[in-house]
Amino acid sequence: MTFDPALQAADPQVADLIAREDTRQRDSLRLIASENYASSAVLEASASSLTNKYAEGYPGRRYYEGMDVIDPLESLAIERAKEIFGAEHANVQPYSGSPANLAALLALVEPGGTILGMSLPAGGHLTHGWKVSATGIYYNAVQYGVRETDHRLDMDQVRSLAKEHSPKLIWCGHSAYPRIVDFEAFAEIANEVGAHLVADIAHIAGLIAGGVHPSPVPHAAAVTTTTHKTLRGPRGGLIMCKAEHAKAIDKAVFPGLQGGPHNHTTAAKAVAFGEALKPEFKDYAAQVVTNAKALGEGLLGRGHTLITGGTDNHLLLVDLTSTGISGRVAARAINACGIEMNGNSIPFDKRKPFDPSGVRVGLAALTSRGLTAEHMDTVAGFIDEGVREAAKHDGTIEDAFATALAGRIREFLQPFPAPGLTD
Ligand SMILES: *Cc1c(COP(=O)(O)O)cnc(C)c1O
């Protein structure tokens, strides 16, 4: 992003740091599954004067004056979110995905109540009741995992835990699961035990918006999401729900958890939702999945192991056990070569969460730059080269190797403009 000269003049230190980050994002192979490139339009809206305004409350019911712009703006974001997902109600105020999840809990479960969610090591999120999260501290959290044989969701286990513990709320959704979630099956179980089903689509919202992943909206009491992952908006959260829960959800977000909404982010969400409603976004979402499958083939072809053998969504979970180095060590080493991914636990991981056996690889960002399936073999080659080099030297990579590979990656990426940075 090119700044007007104000920031450079007022604070060259910060301006230079941001410029360095721009360069890094432009020149590296960004494969962190939760990341993307927001468009210039999204960035511009989020850098606006709207950040100066207080607006506690909701459109038409505010605690402050001067709402002539904020009210229609928030209503616009709400209407667009509802249109994308076919939701009965939307709240666009959550500051991010985690606060959105806390709000859903606050709205639907009494303090200390029982909740059932996917465990972190199996691919779930912290906020689905993991023990160090507020959601695991303030609620009685029971966790399901994946099957040991094929690492897929085990709906029989979900059903038997639901029957045994009678949770008030069941979470579905994930941060590191490469397959389609059967939302209908979750809804059936929630129905059987009288629980609210909440689907957290933080990772896959863009795929659902683009019609390449089934939607939980018809089945779930509430659906939470981030807006900055595959949905490609600003860093933020969103909750959708059935009309019967609208009041409770709104009350939980404000005044339950938050004060004034971040109106500049609301504007950027509205812009991103507008982009997601365009026909091109369907092509984008389909291309993300095509690219993920193609990259998976490229990695399998080079002898790597993929959890579940492949992917149906935007991400791959690679088991690096056979290379002899951990996922974290590998991710760190190849970061020096201009390849960004994160170490990630694999199901039934024998290593500690801080130093897990796998890496998670996502295609949302690279696809936003216009890379297609034909480029994925080259990408797989870069990853493989870096990982093998690191494995050869016990997890370290020499500067000369790293610089050379980073240079080739920079050159490879050069023809693909990075949205928000070089478009
Ligand atoms: C990323 C993520 C979140 C949390 O979002 P933040 O914006 O980082 O708070 C919640 N749920 C899932 C499934 C996620 O992947």
Image: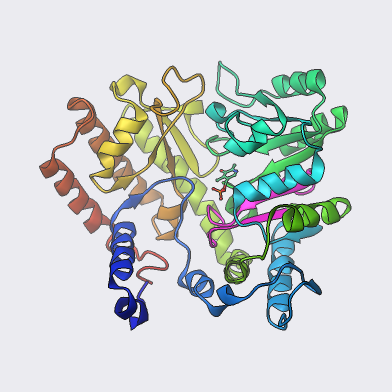
Q: Main structural element of the magenta stretch: helix, strand or loop?
A: loop
Q: Is residue 85 above or below residue 304?
A: below
Q: Is residue 308 visible?
A: yes
Q: Is residue 381 visible?
A: no
Q: Pick whichever, 280 or 332, lies toward us.
A: 332
Q: Pick whichever, 236 or 81, lies toward us.
A: 236
Q: Quadrant of ligand 1?
A: top right
Image quadrant in which the N terminus is located: bottom left
Within the magenta stretch, is there residue 225? Answer: yes
- Using residue 127 as the reference point, say whether residue 383 is left or right of it: left
- Which range of residues does the magenta coloring cover? 215-239
Image quadrant in which the C terminus is located: bottom left
Q: Going 64% across and 66% down the picture, which residue do you hit?
A: 277
- Using residue 181 as the reference point, say whether residue 397 is left or right of it: left
Within the magenta stretch, is there residue 363? Answer: no
Residue 248, x across and y down, in percent = 83, 52
